[in-house]
Image (spheres, rainbow, N blue to C red):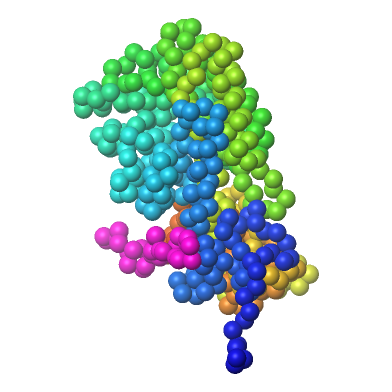
Amino acid sequence: MGATTEPIPQEPMFEVEDLSSVLPMTAEVVSGHLRIGGVDMAKLARERGTALYVMDEAHIRNQLREYVKWTTFHWKDCETIFAGKAFMSVAMCRLVAEEGCALDVSSGGELAFAQAAGFPLERVYVHGNNKTMLELHEAIRAGVGRIVVDSFEELQRISCIAQEMGVEQGILLRITPGIKPDTHGYIQTGQNDSKFGFGLNHGLAMEAVRRAVELPGIDFAGLHMHIGSQIFALQSYSKAIEVIVHFMDEIMRETGVAVRELDTGGGLGIAYGLPDEPSTVEHYGKVIVDGIKEHVEEHDLPVPKIMVEPGRSIVANAGVTLYTAGTIKDVPGIRTYVAVDGGMTDNIRTALYDAHYEVLVADKADQPRKEVVTIAGKHCETGDLIARDVRVQPIEIGDIVCVCSTGAYCQSMASNYNKQVRPAVVFVADGESRVVVRRETYDDLLRCEVG
Ligand SMILES: Cc1ncc(COP(=O)(O)O)c(C=O)c1O
């Protein structure tokens, strides 16, 4: 046999440290290279260009299945609704439909994506604290399953539009249960001082129920709550469930109407950093579904259909962003900046929430992460950082930098600041990659210019 220059394939492993909690489930290191979905990330980046969002299809499907499994395990009439705001694309809508899950949309634009994907519209839930008349018309005309109502004005508007169209629109009322979960202030939504929903204090929520029951063109199906995002302590859900089921009992006593559906929102936290230990979907399913069953039984109420609305915990760890290291600036005694070909335009979370990310070099993934650097973006803001003082393998210019856990609220919050084109999104599975959102071009940027 002749000598070969091919490297001897090694067993997939993380020799140095276990990054599996922040990487997609199919991530592996083979001959020093990070692979996701069987695809070599450094090679993919060089073929498709950077910055690049990569999503592991198997991970997304697995998470949706976990939610379906661990909610219906406790009560058969449960539905998992993917919160499209976390990551929305036509391919994602199709994947959600294939998994038999429902979809939450928060704008006319997100509804248009669901329609473009051929998503079953009776399984679409429409959110937003100030849906425009146009958005309400579009949603009702499209035949969406439920509109989650946020205000008295909106109730009235839906009633008028539905009557005009000769239909009855199913709605849920969004209730703020007065619970403040332990998470970043910007992503707490269930407290009394919130722009969302009807508060329980001062009788507002009960008044909304009375109007919803009486108004023509409206089918009052039930209640919705969402207390916040990136929640680790599940007791916040237990408290909120106790409060909302108590309110269901008040509704029954005061109006004789049974709440048929209860949507407890999303919010389960995920690991962004190695020390993070979020709850499992199994535990979450038990807390939510068993908690509701326990309290409705106490009040002698029928068990409603139960919906959960996760976003981040479906897609965040499924995604990574790949960049190319462009410049390295050492500020002696202070820090080393590694600037990449993206930044706050493809990931605003660090500037917005001081988010933490784990980072690795895609083709040195078996080396110890022993350098500490700051991964900076290329935009004209000092706050344009992606990962501050993060451990990473020795980086050289031209290396492919992989930022972990970027599948949620990065692409969906991306912007064109500095007239930056937004990156492509690639789905990987079974050793294949497919572009599901192409990279923008300058023509895309100029498309709306008419002056
Ligand atoms: C109404 C509603 N439902 C669901 C979600 C999804 O939350 P998460 O991505 O934390 O699961 C959000 C996020 O803000 C939301 O506002």
Residue 107 visible in the picture: yes
In which image quadrant can residue 163 be found?
Answer: top left
Q: Is residue 298 above or below residue 289?
A: above
- Residue at 64% over, 63% down: 359
Measuring from the top left, give residue 102's x and y in whole percent: 41, 38
Q: Residue at x 66, y 29 (%)?
A: 235
- Image height of 14 relative to 106, above or below: below
Viewer-nearest residue: 316 or 449: 316
Report whether residue 321 is seen. no
The residue sitting at the front extreme is: 1
Residue 61 versus residue 183 in the image, above or below: below
Q: Position of residue 156 (x, y in %)?
A: 33, 22
Query: Along the horizontal axis of the image, is 162 left or right of 403?
Result: left
Membership of 449 in magenta stretch: yes
Specify start and end residues of the magenta stretch as a single range. 426-451
Report the number of discs. Answer: 0
Query: Is residue 247 found left or right of 109 in the rendered image?
Result: right
Q: Residue at x 56, y 38 (%)?
A: 267
Q: Between residues 139 and 341, which one lies in front from this camera angle? A: 139
Residue 340: where, in percent of width, then height? 57, 69
Is 254 part of what is drawn in magenta? no
Q: What residue is at 32 percent from the left and 38 percent from the top?
A: 121
The x, y position of residue 82, in whole percent, is 46, 41
